Image (cartoon, helix red, strand yellow):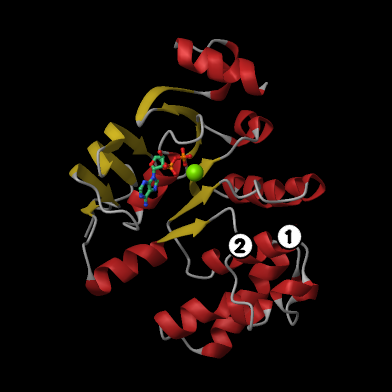
Amino acid sequence: MTTTSSGQPLIVMDRVNKHFGSLHVLRDVDLTVDRGEVVVVIGPSGSGKSTLCRSINRLEPIDSGEIRFDGQPLPAEGRALARLRSEVGMVFQSFNLFAHRTVLENVMLGPVKVRKEKPAAVRERALALLERVGIANQADKYPAQLSGGQQQRAAIARALAMQPKAMLFDEPTSALDPEMVGEVLDVMTSLAADGMTMIVVTHEMGFARHAANRVVFMADGQLVEQAPPAEFFTNPRSDRAKDFLSKIL
Ligand code: ADP
Ligand code: MG
């Protein structure tokens, strides 16, 4: 076969709408993310950023429109949905590690239990990932014995263990003490530099400026504007983006 899927965008959202009861949380959202692209999503609380992320791995089903991942419409159920969820790694504000498993076991669990991969091979990969996120020396500890920054890096390693095609980060540093934010952002910056396709919801404007290919500003369920960071931060076009930036910068 000479055809590959590599020429087309990895994530396509096409006129996506989502309601929670009478609340219209995603309004005609069109978003395309290319392979290797890093998109930072910013916007006020309640604007729909988390719902947007969660819709991409179908943690939130949408009401209308279409989402395609790697050329395929999102599967609704079954093995195809499980595969999608492993191909779209997600890291949340809360670290969500299994408390009664060691860090290494947390990282190994998905590949071994969900993918039925051989533990020996997964162990090698997991140790390499812990090395990569800088916590190889914590492998045999339990999550509660780690700092918040270390736990979040373990959560990133756990998502990466599934060898995802994209990573979604939903305010990954918001629950961290300030002195631990940098170590998590450093891991994300290095992932971005390695070519990972990423959607990152964050209030860390330094990260947005340096690591994003594109900043998307969301308000009231709509993508109000999108631009490369240099352009967005120096010359936001919409009043809502100007207002938002004036409050956080
Ligand atoms: P953001 O991440 O930008 O703060 P969210 O996507 O979490 O925004 O939420 C968008 C809106 O949808 C908010 O008004 C929120 O209260 C509401 N919402 C989110 N999840 C649910 C839910 N499961 N049920 C009802 N309303 C929800
Ligand atoms: Mg949110």
Mark 2 vs mark 1: which is more N-terminal? 2
Residue 20 visible within the image: yes
Q: Residue at x 49, y 46 (%)?
A: 198
Residue 203: x percent and y percent? 61, 35
Q: Is residue 221 left or right of residue 135?
A: left
- Which residue is identified by label 1? 148
- Give the structural element (helix, strand or loop) at label 1: helix
Label 2 sits on residue: 95
Q: Is residue 148 above or below residue 231?
A: below
Q: Is residue 117 left or right of residue 80?
A: right
Query: In the displayed image of the protein, which residue is found farthest to the left?
Result: 64
Q: Quadrant of residue 152?
A: bottom right
Q: Examine the rendered structure and indicate whether residue 21 appears above or below residue 242.
A: below
What amino acid type is highlighted by mark number 1?
Answer: Gly
Is 192 positioned to the left or the right of 73 in the image?
A: right
Identify the image quadrant of residue 151.
bottom right
Q: CA distance from mark 2 to mark 1?
A: 8 Å
| Pointer 1 local density, CA inside 10 Å: few below 14, some 14–19, many at least 20 | many
**Residue 100 spot, x, y in % from top left:** 63, 83
Would you say the residues marked 2 and 1 are in contact, meaning their CB atoms lie under 8 Å apart? yes
